[in-house]
Image (cartoon, rainbow, N blue to C red):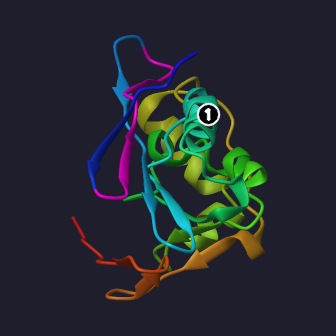
Amino acid sequence: MVVPITEVAKGILRIGPLETGHPGDATSPYLVLGNGSAAVVEPGEDTQLFGVIEAIKACDVDLDRVAYVWASHIHLHHIQAVPKLLKELPKAKFLVHPRGAPHLIEPTRLIQSTIEVWGDKCYGPFEAIPREKVMAVEDNQIIDLGGRELQIIHAPG
């Protein structure tokens, strides 16, 4: 499978669109490159995991160079792939709002609320993320990728 990769700005690569587990739906994760490390933004669902890993490799980025995985929020269609993705990215941590961190470490409530809204077959299983792989980030915190900074902006909504 050839994964489409488009450089949308210098060092910011759109991966996909990658099909989701839902007919007709597709999303595009992003790979953000700094001089020292990289980040995957909006990693998506389990069905997109293979495409994300293949794209990172196709960009000649070592998997241990990816330091962070980040999503705009913790709805499962944005983060279902994260537990498995973190197993493939040995040095990466998942960046999350402080209130979201406990729901990733112990996801029972997150899964139950998703099922209440979307039904019991909406996004498949979601594994807990080990505490040491979760990094709670504060509003206006700067994440340094080496020559490229990402600013965390909490956007309640």
- Mark 1, other Cα within 10 Å: few <14 / some 14–19 / many ≥20: some
Which segment is the magenta one?
10-22
The C terminus lies in quadrant: bottom left
Q: Which residue has dot 1 on it? A: 54
Residue 152 percent across, percent down from the top left = 35, 78
In the displayed structure, 74 sits above or below 93; it is above
Return the residue nearer the eye: 110 or 5.
5
Which residue is drawn at the image coordinates 47% and 82% (left, top)? 144
Return the residue nearer the eye: 26 or 5.
5
Left/right placement of residue 110 relative to residue 74 reads: right
Q: Secondary structure at mark 1?
A: helix
Residue 27 percent across, percent down from the top left = 37, 32
The quarter holding residue 15 reads top left
The N terminus lies in quadrant: top right
In the displayed structure, 111 sits above or below 147; it is above
Amino acid under disc 1: Glu
- Residue 128 falls within the magenta-colored stretch: no
Which residue is drawn at the image coordinates 60% and 47% (left, top)? 60
Furthest residue in direction top, as rendered: 23
